[in-house]
Image: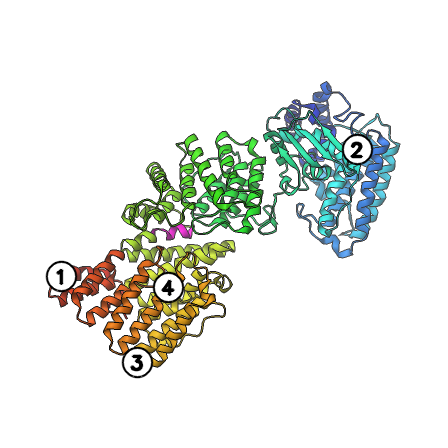
Amino acid sequence: MNRHRFELRMNAEQVSADLQSDWNSQGAEVFDFAILDTIEPSDDPQYDPSEDLEVLEQLWLEQLKPFGEGGFMTDTDARSSLKSVVEDLRAEGDELYQLLEEMDTGFWTQVSTFKDWTVWDVVAHLHLSDHMALTSLRSSDDFKTLMRDMGKSGSMRAYTNAWLTENGHSINGPELLIRWRTMFQQLCEALAAADPDERFAWAGPGMKARMFATARQMETWAHGWEIYDLMKVKRRHSDRLQNIVTIGVRTFGWSFSNRKLPVPEPAPYVELTAPSGKLWTFNDQDENNCVRGTAVDFCQVVTQVRNVADTQLQVSGDTANGWMAIAQCFAGPPEDPPAPEDTSTGLAATDGVTAPLLEGIGPLQFPISTSVPLAQAYFNQALTLSFGFNHAEAVRSFKEAARQDATCGICWAGAALALGPNINAPMSEDAVAPAWQAIQQAIALRAFETPREQAYIDAIATRYSEDGGDRKALDIIYAGSMSGLVEQYPDDLNARALRAEALMDLMPWAYWNDDGSAASQNTNILVEDLETVMAADPQHPGALHLYIHVMERFEPQRAVAAADRLGGLVPVAGHLVHMPSHIYLRVGRYSDAVDANAEAAEADEDYIAQCNAQGLYPAAYYPHNIHFLWYSAMMEGRKTLSISSALKLAERVPLDMARQMGALQSYVAVPVYTYVRFGMWDEVLALPDAPEGLPFSQAMLHYGRGLAYAAKGDVQRAQAELDTLSNMATSEPVQSLNMRMPGVNEPLMGIASSLVTARIARAGNDSYVELAALEKAVALQDSLPYTEPPHWHYPVRQTLGEAQLRAGHYADAAITFAEDLQHFPKNPWSLYGSELAQNGLGEATDDVKQQRIHAWRNADIDPAVSW
């Protein structure tokens, strides 16, 4: 026996063994063209593929004998007579022909969603399949010759192209249509005249004429969708679909055994509404294991024209959901159904735009029950990205994991998870439908998952409703579900990290009261969860990230070790690279904060360029790195770096998004802030007006101009800028801005007005008014909600302390600078102010001087207190 024969025999024996379990779910037509994929071209001139086909057929038939010779459809199935099935086939072909006949010539080259086939490819495939069937009906010897020639060509596709080539060129679409139509009519005539009891040769076991007609109808109907979808033409349906429905129902077991999966029992109850309105039912009635809907939807799913999520089928029970997720009523190796449409983008997960596997994604592991290594890799990457707040890329990676393993329900649950709310953003309305769709897909695949994975799916499912529901209530329910998951699997570190995040989502940025006490018992629970995870896995990026956010406001020292571990852990995830700076800024490690954000910005720039990233992450998280770098550089007195970062940040802000988000408008204002910080008054006055529709950015320009005119002695113009600023503060455009956190618009505008007022008073040598205005500015800054970097661009106490020094109020200045150092440890500007205040009081300054020298080590300006 030659090598080909041996490989084919082994393949056939394996397939035959797989088919023994349930004959009711198998049939001759399921073998269709499966053998063609196993035949390898041979250089041996004596090699005859038809001999291998005979070996396969004999092996299969031996296995099928216990189940009878009649195939899986009995004479009472579907539209039983040969004549009626041939009539159905003829009607199917006539309908498709009429559609194709109206097409323009150029339409034949349009690419469908099916394997990138053109319309020409679709019709050519149908034509060859009909040719094979007609050849078999006419002569078994001719059929063997055809199969031999096809085997030598290497594949059906190669043979088709060669068969339809004349004078070196493939025939065009209209010519192909005529040829297919002619042969199709001949096939229908031959089927109608065939002996109903004769078995005709085929690639696998032979088929009787009625089975030939049924199989040809199924394939013609299924491939027809590619053309209907391209033309956007509504398709008419008739009860001839009953033939395809029956194939779909009877191949329940095949869908599982073809994937080497155990066939669950019992088969689901199927209740379908025919195009005529009749009710077709199959199997024993079972409300907890059933498929209901239209025959059209059902046929689309079993022929893999549509994903079940894109139909109106009502599916109940793990077995039924598992079946509909992988249903396959045609032959060959397992095929994945098309992914559900992503309603947020209009694209399906299998649209060819797959997520890349990123280098440097870190150590996070979440073992899932998949035999596909790429699915596991993409799942780990997706969860890491989700913990790193790159939710759009996380969704893309979760979907790619699902594409790699079509039975991965928890992959779809992950996609749903990443579409939900987080501490920085509520759930958008655009995410409601995709999240619901994803979790429904997860539920459909639940039967394939382990009990732990099923528990995850069940918990995440409580987070969503089809219409979005009461978001606050759903968040509470989801947090409770995650608590249940942790109780069930107390050693699952990822479950604990996700519960902590769920609890944080209930109170974003409000985990503590203003006195530093826990805002609720949930704070204590989530802190314990995160510390438990970090103790067991010191390199868990999710726990490290979330712990930094929880601790940064009141106890940043507790998170220094977490910050140091996180920085280089996931170098490709810019936000995680950036996160240590939240702690570094709070403990006075300004140089480390600069470095972290420089590295984060570079990582995000590489990622955005590589993945062509769109949406919130590149629009907000990436600029946040530059913003943080800019703020940290100013704290160090690094003028050159501050200016270059400010100009870069202002250029990178998407203005359309900034028009909707006041927080981004503050990014546009950073050149003003920078020039103010370093007393660069001419540069302030040289700045152009803010782009239209950015009222906060324009208001900050008036703030800068007011300071600049006052500093240059032009009090009249400074007062005019202050008047404009004051009017803008109460205007509707400014008042209605979304500044990400509530209650910040008014104090920000108040600080700006107070600082301009103080500078005008200074120009008039009115220290009383100046100090009063600066004290008001300090009080307003203290009233701002916590965020990092702070909402205002520098510590206002520095300016108050400088004014107190000029007024000779050294004791007050010492207190002011000491208070500022409580808020901003090791702040170089306030260290210098403390040194001057102590000197004015006649106190020793050696200690503070040494601190000041070290703190100013990276500055490119002389030590200063304020502008």
Residue at which label 4 appears: 748
Name which of mark 2 and mark 3 comes first in the sequence: 2
Whether residues under marks 1 and 2 lie with C-beta atoms below 8 angstroms apart, the answer is: no
* SS at mark 4 in the image: helix
The reply to whether the C-beta atoms of the residues labelled 1 and 4 are less than 8 Å apart is no
Q: Secondary structure at mark 3?
A: loop
Q: Left or right: where does residue 452 sit relative to residue 196?
A: left
Label 3 sits on residue = 713
Task: Name above or below for residue 257 compared with residue 758.
Answer: above
Q: Is residue 385 visible?
A: yes
Contact between marks 2 and 3 (CB within 8 A): the answer is: no
Q: Earlier in the sequence, mark 1 or mark 2?
A: 2
Question: How far is the residue under mark 1 from the one under mark 2?
Answer: 98 Å
User: Within the magenta stretch, is there residue 447?
Assistant: no
Which mark's residue is nearer the viewer, 4 or 3?
A: 4
- Mark closer to the chain start, 3 or 1: 3
Q: Which of the two discs, 2 and 3, sits closer to the camera?
A: 3
Looking at marks 1 and 4 on the same chain, the residue that comes earlier in the sequence is marked by 4
Query: What crowding class fits label 1: few (fewer than 14 Cα within 10 Å), some (14-19), or many (20 or more)?
Result: few
Q: What kind of residue is marked 2?
A: Phe
| Three-letter amino acid code at the position of disc 1 | Asp
Q: Which residue is mark 2?
A: 212
* Residue beneath disc 1: 846
Q: What residue is shown at x 65% (from left), y 25% (from top)?
A: 13
The residue depicted at 74 percent of the width and 26 percent of the height is 72
Q: Which residues are magenta?
A: 573-580
Q: In the image, residue 339 lies at what x, y percent?
A: 61, 43
Can you give x and y, in whole percent of width and height, for residue 805 in the image? Answer: 19, 69
